[in-house]
Image (tube, rainbow, N blue to C red):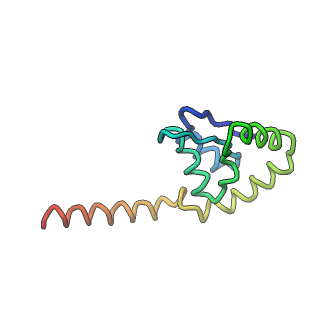
Amino acid sequence: DVFLDTTAYNAHSTGCNSLWTGVPLLTYSKVKMASRVAAGMNSAVSLSAYTARTLQDYEDIAIVLGRDPARAERFRRRMTHQRERAWLFDTKGMVALLERGLGMAWDVFLA
């Protein structure tokens, strides 16, 4: 399995679900934020190799992933371990950062 992301508007939550289940998220970033979301997710799980630099790279990587089931299995195993340490899936850590930020905003408001 390979998740082939669209270029104009990336996967967002569906891409997160793909990574969580161990399916490679292949993406190609453009300039606008909506086309860079999946690249950020790949980076957050230390898998930037699945963010193509050109459309030709995107096609080449897709072909390699499609023809090599063993590589997909290695990805799945790596992702199973990676998701326990990746900040993308660290809900408690993100909540703590959000709470800290809200506290800082409140302090500024009161000052």
Q: For the point 28% across and 60% down, which residue is it?
A: 102
**Residue 103 location, quadrant:** bottom left
Give x and y (percent) for residue 84: 61, 63
**Residue 46 location, quadrant:** bottom right
Give x and y (percent) for residue 106: 20, 62
> Residue placed farthest to the left in the image?
111
Looking at the image, residue 7 lies above or below residue 40: above
Task: Identify which residue, 39 or 74, lies in the foreground.
Answer: 39
Looking at the image, residue 102 lies above or below residue 4: below
Quarter of the figure with the C terminus: bottom left
Indicate left or right for 20 with 61 as reference.
left
Indicate left or right for 111 with 85 as reference.
left
Q: For the point 55% across and 32% down, which residue is it?
A: 8
Indicate left or right for 107 with 23 as reference.
left
Task: Identify which residue, 64 or 74, lies in the foreground.
Answer: 64
Q: For the point 66% across and 55% down, which residue is it?
A: 47
Task: Identify which residue, 2 or 51, lies in the foreground.
Answer: 51
Q: For the point 59% across and 55% down, which residue is it?
A: 43
**Residue 81 location, quadrant:** bottom right
Count of numbered tags: 0
Quarter of the figure with the N terminus: top right
Looking at the image, residue 74 lies above or below residue 14: below
Give x and y (percent) for residue 28: 63, 41
Indicate left or right for 32 with 97 as reference.
right
